[in-house]
Image: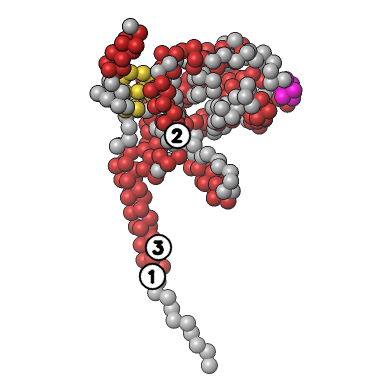
Amino acid sequence: MSTKRPDTPKGKPRHIFRKLVIIFLGLVILAEVLFLLVGRNAPNLTQTKLQSGGSSSILDYKGNEVATLGNENRDYTTSNNFSTQMKDAVVSIEDRHFYQEPLGINPVRIIKAGFHNLTNPGSVQGGSTLTQQLVKLSVFSTKKSDQTFKRKIQEAYLTINVERNYSKQQILEFYMNKVYLANGVYGMGTASEYYFGKSPKELTLAQTALIAGMPQAPNTYDPYQHPETAQKRRDAVIDAMLANNKISQNDAITAKQTPLTDGLLAKRDLDQENNNRYVADNYIKEVIDEVKSKGYDPYRDNLKIKTNLHLDVQKTTLQCGQQ
């Protein structure tokens, strides 16, 4: 005696599929609405902010600005004054798919970075594109506790808007002028002069790679303080350029054999040279130390730092002390 399995209703699979499609579309629409609602409340991002260096303002008890930090040691360099070699170095080490990312976001890279961070707790890998890094440096704090889901949505929203309103060359120019490169230096044009006494177009491949590799951890890759780490990072940039077909094997070998100190000038304290009027004030020094202790970088995070400083009282006290 044979038994037959009951026939599955013909319409049931289609009905389930239709439900799944509706649920999927609903989730997509919900995500888009959430993205727009949160994104539209993002900080205003103007071309002035994109072009300016990382700078913070110190305010007195009335909200008046009494000092600025971080924007003094930088000369803005336009795209045509950066060599193709330096642009290739930056793109190769930071975001090799930069020119192929129409929205400025690379989902594959974000997923890979997330998987890497989950499977390697002691190693953190970033998934941000070059445009996302520019947005972070222009309007957001670098403090880890501020990297919330809401901020990530706003960052993506602003990144897409930047990509829509500016060319890739403009975005790269903004980024190369924005980054901090240790020792009070901002922007790769300024760094070229500070470290090697040259314009960006005059740098050798080895010198270019050193500067291009510093922004991710400028103090760690400081050639004066950490020459061995700086050389490893420089060589990593050279390897990235080779993998990205921007230089030949012979170029890479020659550059990596070049001593790190080749053409490197003696260290100068630009912070001391340019910020004496702030550093001399013990109150301002204490404010800077307190901000740093909270995880912020007052020279890069575009902060408004409110204090209880009574500038008029301080001036009066100073004048009485001089009499």
**Near-viewer residue (294 or 134):** 294
The mark that comes first in sequence, 3 or 1, is: 1
Residue 294, by quadrant, is top left
Q: Which residue is mark 1?
A: 12
Residue 316, by quadrant, is top left
Q: Which residue is mark 3?
A: 17
Proximity of marks 2 and 1: CB atoms separated by less than 8 Å: no
Q: Position of residue 256 (x, y in %)?
A: 72, 24
Q: Position of residue 127 (x, y in %)?
A: 51, 39
Image height of 130 relative to 276, above or below: below
- Label 3 crowd (10 A; few <14 / some 14-19 / many >=20): few
Q: Position of residue 190 (x, y in %)?
A: 52, 15
**Near-viewer residue (77 or 249):** 77
Q: Which residue is mark 2?
A: 293
Please name the residue shown 54% across and 15% down the image.
269
Residue 192, by quadrant, is top right
- Looking at the rendered structure, the kind of residue marked 3 is Phe
Please name the residue shown 27% across and 17% down the image.
313
Nearer to us of marks 2 and 3 is: 2
The mark that comes first in sequence, 2 or 3, is: 3
Q: Is residue 206 left or right of residue 44?
A: right
Q: Which residues are magenta?
A: 253-258
Please name the residue shown 35% across and 8% down the image.
322
Please name the residue shown 38% across and 30% down the image.
139
- Looking at the rendered structure, the kind of residue marked 2 is Ser
Proximity of marks 3 and 1: CB atoms separated by less than 8 Å: no
Most frequent secondary structure within the magenta stretch: helix
